[in-house]
Image: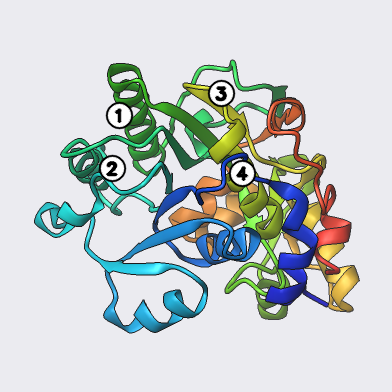
Amino acid sequence: MPLNSSARRRSAAPLLRPQSKAKPRLLIVGCGDVGMRVLSVLAGRWQVMALTSSPQRMDELRAAGALPILGNLDQAKTLSRLSGWADRVLHLAPPKTEGLQDSRTTHLLQALKRARLPQRLVYASTTGVYGNCQGARFDESRPVAPASDRARRRVDAESQLRRFGAAHAVSVTILRVPGIYASDRAGGHPRERLARGAPVLNRADDVFTNHIHADDLARACVLALSRGAPQRVIHVCDDSELLMGDYFDLAADLCGLARPPRINRQQAQTLMTPMQLSFMSESRRLINERLKRELRLKLRYPYPQQGLSA
């Protein structure tokens, strides 16, 4: 069964102990599912402000322990209240869905520069910035090679943030994140896809995919806010190396559902959306030693076998 909020708080309590008596001040930008899990990890030990563009979420954020602030990353004039308050910033907001630049990150950094700057900024990017690596196993020193506009926007965001950190002496940590899953995350468990009978590729055409449980990602975000090295990139992924089809077979077996049908790549061209095809055209295996050595994160779900069953 998934951990409820109180259980998450108990299990995460030793994760990070601020040294000073004053509570650190954290601004969360993009406080969706992962941001809410971060709030559970912190459990009131930090002061947290959460940016939201939805008035309907104000009560939910307050109940989770955050001070909600209304603003829209697409409207720079609404972000004036973000400057000068936070010691640390957790940037979880995705770019817009078109273009090659991430204007949302641009607007955020412009707002932060108006007053006292934060000491640290952590950004959740994507492993899609590497493009297709032909199944290679690699660490964070590999150059980016984005193959889609979606990934190019992420590369632009990373570049903006690293320049910002270097120019203003702000410690910026980039977390490159693969597929996020959890049984209590909307769309975060394969069972819905399996129930639809959606196909996967034949083994000969299949690609390696990488995964992280949403709870482990939230814990990594919190650790990066205090332990992340300046201008550093970190892979936030589990220890598994699974072909995509094997991942869905595993999920099917655990859920007691039929394994998905297998098709070849030519059939996929007619049966899958461009978004699905893009994911099935990139194969990589990520090394996560920095995550364990530098952030000192002990994965709660090192393999999907454990996380999918939770």
Left or right: residue 229 versus residue 285 is left
Q: In this view of the protein, which residue sits in the foreground, 215 or 146? A: 215
Q: Mark 1 points at which residue?
A: 160
Q: Position of residue 105 (x, y in %)?
A: 28, 42
169 and 309: which is toward the camera: 169
Q: Is residue 301 above or below residue 167?
A: below
User: Where is 63 relative to 31, above or below?
Assistant: below
Q: Could you tell me the amino acid type at mark 2?
A: Thr
**Which residue was labeled with disc 2?**
105
Spatial CA span between label 2 and label 1:
8 Å
Q: Nearer the viewer, residue 243 or 264?
A: 243
- Is disc 1 surrounded by few (<14), some (14 to 19) or many (20+) residues within 10 Å? some
| Amino acid residing under circle 1 | Gln
Pair 1/3: label in front: 3
Circle 3 crowding by C-alpha within 10 Å: few under 14, some 14–19, many from 20: some
Q: Choose mark 4 or mark 2, whichever is in front.
A: 4
Distance from disc 4 to disc 3, alpha carbons, whole Å, reads 17 Å
Q: Do the residues labelled 2 and 1 touch (CB within 8 Å)?
A: yes
Residue under numbered circle 3: 229
Give the alpha-carbon distance from disc 4 to disc 2, as whole Å: 28 Å
User: At numbered mark 1, what does the secondary structure look like: helix, strand or loop?
Assistant: helix
- Residue 263 seen: no
Q: In this view, does 96 lie to the left or right of 120?
A: left
Please tell me whether mark 3 or mark 2 is closer to you in this view.
3
Tell me where residue 87 appears, x and y as whole percent: 40, 41
Callout 4 secondary element: loop
Query: Of the residues under marks 1 and 4, which one precedes in the sequence?
Result: 4
